[in-house]
Image: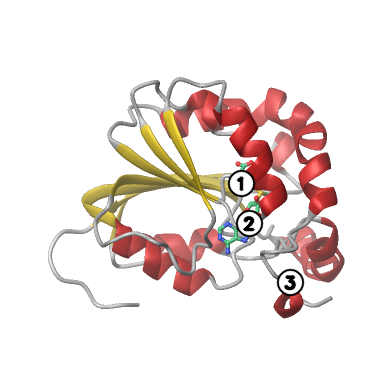
């Protein structure tokens, strides 16, 4: 099955089943802190793009309105089960980042965690994020990106196999570069983590502010 053959209707049932157990240790050792920083000060209406099993939900403040967009039915079911345990108002929505079912300027903040590696069309997804985040609102992200040097070449070699075992994820996507060059957003914060646990799988975390006024698609 190629990337193009994959349909959101079928999803990745095995990936959905193993995601939380496989991620439990990295979540505890590394990712929980990143997620907490990403959620700091969130208010209003938030888009959680590719919410997966709902790993961001525990970090969302109780007074938030969250639209958790998730195209994979197996992931979405797990997220729905998890959402029931939290005070934040969390609505699960069946959609993909390339076509978001919202009017322009709907969100105060969009949060993207380990999903811009997986969207089939990154450019179309960023067009949609720029459209639905209100001017002055934020796009916050935590993504893994292609490593540099030898590890980067290893990522290139492993990428085709990784795509199949990791739910359609592109291991060697240069998401950080794409995000920081997008002129529709102003860079507020950007950090690249490439040591310790992140050495083989570098992470980028940051905040972009949706520019006010007119903008041209990149
Ligand atoms: C690696 S998981 C990350 C889940 C979650 N954001 C987290 O922090 O754990 C990637 C998620 O993106 C979803 N996804 C795949 N294609 C997508 C698309 N085109 N738009 C939005 N989400 C997508 C997958 O179904 C999966 O749940």
Residue in the picture at 87% in, 66% down: 161
Q: Do we see residue 188 in this rendering?
A: no
- Quadrant of the snapshot with the C terminus: bottom left
Residue 165 x/y as whole percent: 85, 57
Helix, strand or loop under label 3: loop
The disc, 1 or 2, on the residue closer to the chain's N-terminal end is 2
Is the residue under label 2 in contact with that under label 1 (CB below 8 Å)?
yes
Q: Choose mark 3 or mark 1, whichever is in front.
A: 3
Q: Is residue 196 left or right of 192 when viewed as pictured?
A: right
Using the numbered discs, state the Cα–Cα distance from disc 1 to disc 2 in whole angstroms. 6 Å
Q: How many marks?
A: 3
Q: Secondary structure at mark 1?
A: strand
Percent across and percent down for residue 41 are 33, 27
- Give the residue at mark 1: 203
The residue under label 3 is: 6
Which disc, if any, is residue 145? 2
Callout 3 touching callout 1 (CB < 8 Å): no
At mark 2, the secondary structure is loop
Tell me what residue is drawn at x 76 percent, y 48 percent. 200
Dot 3 or dot 2: first in sequence order is 3
For the residue carrying disc 2, how many other residues have a C-alpha within 10 Å: few (<14), some (14-19), or many (20+)? many
């Amino acid at each position: 099955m190629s990337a193009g053959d994959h349909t959101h209707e079928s999803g990745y049932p095995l990936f959905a089943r193993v995601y939380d157990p496989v991620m439990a240790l990295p979540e505890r050792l590394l990712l929980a802190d990143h997620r907490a920083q990403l959620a700091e000060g969130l208010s209003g209406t938030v888009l959680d793009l590719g919410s997966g099993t709902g790993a961001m939900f525990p970090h969302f403040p109780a007074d938030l309105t969250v639209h958790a967009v998730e195209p994979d039915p197996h992931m979405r079911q797990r997220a729905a089960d998890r959402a029931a345990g939290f005070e934040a108002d969390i609505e699960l929505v069946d959609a993909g980042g390339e076509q978001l079912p919202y009017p322009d300027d709907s969100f105060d903040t969009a949060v993207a965690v380990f999903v811009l590696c997986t969207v089939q069309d990154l450019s179309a997804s960023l067009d949609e994020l720029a459209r639905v985040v209100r001017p002055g609102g934020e796009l916050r992200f935590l993504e893994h990106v292609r490593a540099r040097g030898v590890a980067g070449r290893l990522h290139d070699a492993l990428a085709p196999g990784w795509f199949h075992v990791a739910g359609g994820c592109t291991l060697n996507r240069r998401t950080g570069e794409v995000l920081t060059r997008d002129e529709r957003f102003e860079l507020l914060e950007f950090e690249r983590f490439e040591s310790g646990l992140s050495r083989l799988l570098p992470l980028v975390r940051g905040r972009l502010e949706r520019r006010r006024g007119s903008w041209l698609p990149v």
